[in-house]
């Protein structure tokens, strides 16, 4: 451990928040280390949730829209241009109880820490919620998906279901309508949470049929999904729905497992910061992006808070000298 | 970089190429419109370099190999399939971290 250099700042996560923090701290000469995470097919992965999207229409500066993965490649290239070091590894443990802070990657968390840091910026984001039904994990990739852009292609001319009633569910349904012959949108209640513009688009799409007050309760099929059982939430009757694909878009939960017992969290699991700031309960540890945002959850607000975290970290480091 | 060591397969050369390999081959089914595929590609390049001689990495762009993709029941991108002497021995749907992939491969090396 004596040989492990102490970094000025280690950034955990590589979505819009983490990479914006990297751009700012790199330009400040702090030579940030970004632990971008490991590939995964949920949203908890390098580049963050935008890696699972197609066209992003509301990120300022792109009047014609921009592809989510392309936008994130630009973020990363910009951070690297100023000297940020980005590693494709996932933090497996942190010890924030004393300074320098300790960060481990890989499975051996009893070994010496992999990295030491004067300050840490947490931008681990959020990951897709699943329904929690039997055999859910084993069916991912066998008809069950959390990434329409990855898997929609395989459901050409087939009937599929999308579960959820928010913007991301409707975006997925719209995207999938390019391939599938029919999309059942399963909505738990009798209304959608999605924005007006997305609702209008979805309702105008002839391939999308909204099934109100409907929950998916069981996946049927041995090696891949052959159909599903759905429940009508008004009369509680169960029926079969013949679909070969199911896309889940019921929302996200913050990725905070690493910090349990160390960083203060709200009741809903999001990291707590000083109001209007990114400072956490531990001096020198800052939180930005979706991991601490249970309200806006936009790429642009994540990027904004990544900038805030970088500036706060920079000033805090200066004060320590 | 390690690109030279990674095979590119299409419908035309898929079976023939795999049958000829002595070492296990990990085939990565991907597409340029798939975000998570990009993250996985970086990891597979590292594995190709570090495990040269023990394992071969091959890539199939599903847009260039529709029959192969259907034949191997790929329903999700990325999907990795491990082949030994031309036969599929393991299927890994979804992007994974390096340690997980190496653990699965260790069974076949």
Image: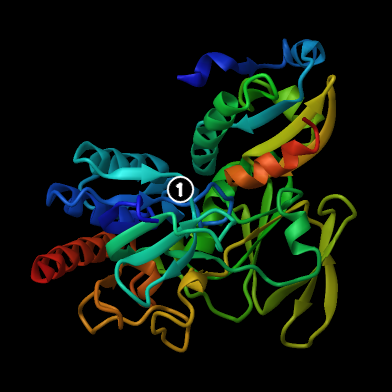
| Closer-to-camera residue (A30/A298) | A30
Residue sitting at x 69%, y 36%: B80
In the drawing, does residue A148 fall left or right of residue A256?
Answer: right
Residue sitting at x 62%, y 52%: A207
Image quarter hosting the N terminus of chain A: bottom left
**Residue B84 appears anywhere in the view:** yes
Extreme residue toward the front, this view: A2
In the drawing, does residue A37 fall left or right of residue A119?
Answer: right
Q: Does B21 sit above or below residue B29?
A: above
Label 1 marks a residue whose chain is A
Residue sitting at x 30%, y 79%: A282
The residue that mark 1 highlights is A51
In the drawing, does residue A303 fall left or right of residue A115?
Answer: left
Q: Does A102 sit above or below residue A73?
A: below
Residue sitting at x 49%, y 79%: A260
- The picture places residue A14, in percent across and down from the top left corner, at 38, 53
Q: Does B61 sit above or below residue A22?
A: above
Q: Which of the 4 quarters of the picture holds residue B73?
A: top right
Extreme residue toward the right, this view: A222
Q: Does A167 sit above or below residue B79?
A: below
| Closer-to-camera residue (B18/A68) | B18
| Closer-to-camera residue (A82/B69) | A82
- The picture places residue A50, in percent across and down from the top left corner, at 42, 52
**Residue A64 appears anywhere in the view:** no
Q: Secondary structure at mark 1?
A: helix
Q: Which of the 4 quarters of the picture holds residue A250?
A: bottom right
In the drawing, does residue A229 fall left or right of residue A279?
Answer: right
Q: How is the image coloured?
A: rainbow
Image quarter hosting the C terminus of chain A: bottom left
- The picture places residue A101, in percent across and down from the top left corner, at 34, 67
């Amino acid at each position: 451990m004596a040989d492990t250099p102490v970094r000025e700042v280690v950034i955990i996560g590589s979505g819009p928040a983490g990479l914006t923090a990297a751009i700012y701290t790199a330009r400040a000469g702090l030579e940030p280390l970004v632990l971008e995470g490991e590939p995964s097919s949920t949203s908890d992965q390098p580049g963050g949730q935008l890696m699972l999207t197609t066209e992003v229409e509301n990120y300022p500066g792109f009047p014609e829209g921009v592809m989510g993965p392309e936008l994130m490649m630009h973020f990363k290239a910009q951070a690297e241009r100023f000297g940020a070091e980005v590693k494709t590894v996932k933090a497996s443990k942190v010890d924030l109880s004393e300074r320098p802070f300790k960060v481990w990657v890989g499975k051996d968390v009893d070994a010496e820490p992999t990295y030491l840091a004067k300050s840490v910026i947490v931008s681990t984001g959020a990951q897709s919620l699943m329904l929690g039904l039997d055999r859910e994990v084993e069916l991912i990739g066998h008809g069950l998906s959390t990434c329409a852009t990855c898997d929609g292609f395989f459901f050409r001319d087939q009937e599929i279901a999308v579960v959820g009633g928010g913007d991301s569910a409707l975006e997925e349904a719209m995207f999938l309508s390019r391939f599938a012959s029919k999309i059942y949108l399963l909505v738990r209640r009798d209304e959608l949470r999605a924005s007006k513009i997305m609702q209008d688009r979805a309702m105008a799409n002839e391939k999308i049929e909204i099934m109100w007050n409907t929950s998916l309760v069981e996946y049927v099929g041995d090696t891949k999904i052959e159909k599903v059982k759905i429940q009508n939430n008004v009369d509680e009757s169960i029926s079969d729905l013949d679909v070969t694909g199911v896309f889940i878009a019921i929302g996200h939960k913050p990725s905070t497992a690493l910090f349990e017992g160390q960083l203060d969290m709200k009741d809903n699991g999001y990291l707590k910061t000083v109001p209007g700031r990114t400072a956490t309960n531990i001096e020198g540890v800052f939180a930005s992006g979706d991991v601490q945002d249970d309200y806006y959850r936009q790429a642009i607000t994540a990027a904004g808070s990544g900038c805030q975290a970088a500036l706060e970290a920079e000033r805090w480091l200066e004060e320590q000298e | 970089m390690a690109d030279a060591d990674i095979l590119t397969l299409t419908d035309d050369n898929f079976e023939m190429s795999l049958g000829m390999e002595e070492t296990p081959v990990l085939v990565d089914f991907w597409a340029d419109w798939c975000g998570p595929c990009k993250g996985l590609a970086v990891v597979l390049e590292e594995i190709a370099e570090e495990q040269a001689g023990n394992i071969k990495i091959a890539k199939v762009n599903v847009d260039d190999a529709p029959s192969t993709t259907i034949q191997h029941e790929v329903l999700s991108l990325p999907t990795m399939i491990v082949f030994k002497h031309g036969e599929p021995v393991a299927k890994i749907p979804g992007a994974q971290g390096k340690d997980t992939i190496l653990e699965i491969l260790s069974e076949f090396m």
